[in-house]
Image (cartoon, helix red, strand yellow):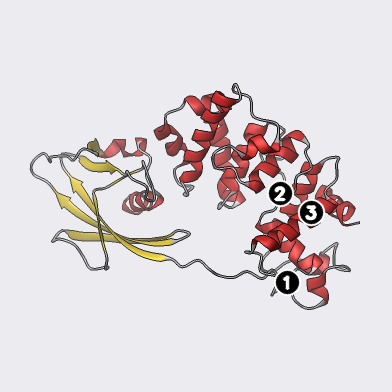
């Protein structure tokens, strides 16, 4: 009953998306990675641009990392792009350039977890693995009355077991996509369409007035406040940018020369021309930008280059840098 109702709803209400109906595991993979931490409307153009630039695994594997990051620029969470690049090379090295067709082999690729592996395995290869994401945790918590914290592994296993019970041997990909779609557009975190819900007669949350309560999720993420001071040097219509290294955020992206302070106080005597803030999953970045005109050609550190202002768009940069340029234009 649950499966038939869900699939009937999906047939009637599914959105037209550029990856909808796709059977190429590579393109399904790209879409799933882009949609992690990204809304559909934002990810749409990035998906089209990514598969146009890198139409297959081999093209992605052969591309330099800087090009991959440049195409990804603006989506954030750059480790997703770096992991995809590494996974493409794994596929070339370990699977002769063919995307693996077994769940266990897909799961071993860099950056692919249980959910993404199940999505690819079910949609591309028809394997009955449930893809449990936040949408699925929410609809199952509400419909089946799961009142335990969905952040707990035991709760996720419970939801996975429920989905295993209902996922059909035929077209498991449609079942997974229907679950995701139902949570994304119907059984939403807020303002869900309970009055028109096909599961209204069986939904535990609706019967017990718990739609606003379920799912239960503990808020365990504490955000670290960081203060970045960027120096926007101008010399002969050029500026200095540096490549971030180490195992910190924005690795291998370019930025203005930067100092980090423990407090939000200004650094140096240069004029501060802008203050921006970016909220990441575990951090809040407070960025202060200082303008300084140089009379003499600057000496550069090993990770720095002098770039004409009109060539800055060729270098992959974190979102906070592109926001700066947008506001300066």
Q: Is residue 203 above or below residue 33?
A: below
Quickly name the residue at label 1. Answer: 147
Point 69% across, 62% down: residue: 154
Q: Is residue 161 above or below residue 255?
A: below
Q: Which mark is residue 258?
A: none
- For the residue pair 156 and 209, the one nearer the viewer reads as 156
Q: Determine the residue located farthest toward the top in the rendered image.
A: 96
Residue 259 image point, x, y percent: 23, 55
From mark 1 to mark 2, how far is it between C-alphas? 20 Å
Quickly name the residue at label 3. Answer: 163
Give whichever of discs 3 and 1 has the lower sequence position: 1
Residue 10 image point, x, y percent: 81, 50
From mark 3 to mark 1, how far is it between C-alphas? 17 Å
Mark 1 crowd level (few <14, some 14–19, many ≥20, 10 Å Cα) = some
Give whichever of discs 1 and 2 has the lower sequence position: 2
Give whichever of discs 2 and 3 has the lower sequence position: 2
Point 70% across, 34% down: residue: 102
């Amino acid at each position: 009953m649950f499966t038939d109702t869900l699939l009937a709803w999906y047939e009637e209400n599914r959105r037209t998306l550029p990856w909808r109906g796709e059977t190429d595991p590579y393109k399904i993979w790209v879409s799933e990675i882009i949609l992690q931490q990204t809304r559909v409307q934002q990810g749409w153009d990035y998906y089209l641009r990514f598969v146009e630039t890198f139409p297959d695994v081999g093209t992605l594997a052969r591309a330099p990392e800087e090009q991959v990051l440049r195409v990804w620029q603006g989506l954030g969470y750059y480790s997703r792009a770096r992991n995809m690049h590494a996974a493409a090379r794994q596929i070339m090295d370990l699977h002769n350039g063919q995307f693996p067709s077994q769940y266990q082999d897909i799961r071993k690729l860099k950056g692919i977890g249980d959910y993404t592996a199940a999505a690819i395995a079910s949609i591309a290869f028809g394997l009955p693995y449930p893809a449990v994401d936040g949408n699925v945790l929410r609809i199952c918590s509400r419909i089946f009355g799961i009142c335990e914290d969905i952040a707990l592994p035991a709760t996720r296993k419970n939801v996975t077991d429920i989905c295993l019970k209902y996922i059909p041997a035929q077209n498991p990909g449609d079942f997974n996509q229907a679950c995701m779609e139902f949570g994304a557009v119907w059984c939403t975190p807020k303002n869900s369409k309970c009055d028109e819900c096909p599961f209204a007669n069986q939904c535990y949350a609706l019967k017990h007035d718990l739609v606003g309560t379920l799912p239960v999720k503990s808020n365990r993420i504490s955000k670290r406040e960081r203060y970045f001071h960027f120096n926007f040097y101008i010399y002969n219509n050029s500026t200095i940018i540096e490549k971030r290294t180490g195992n910190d955020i924005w690795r291998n992206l370019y930025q203005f020369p930067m100092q980090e302070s423990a407090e939000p106080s200004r650094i140096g005597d240069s004029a501060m021309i802008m203050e921006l803030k970016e909220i990441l999953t575990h951090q809040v970045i407070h960025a202060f930008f200082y303008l300084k005109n140089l009379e003499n050609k600057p000496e550069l550190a090993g990770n720095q280059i002098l770039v004409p202002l009109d060539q800055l768009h060729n270098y992959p940069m974190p979102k906070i840098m592109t926001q700066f340029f947008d506001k300066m234009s």
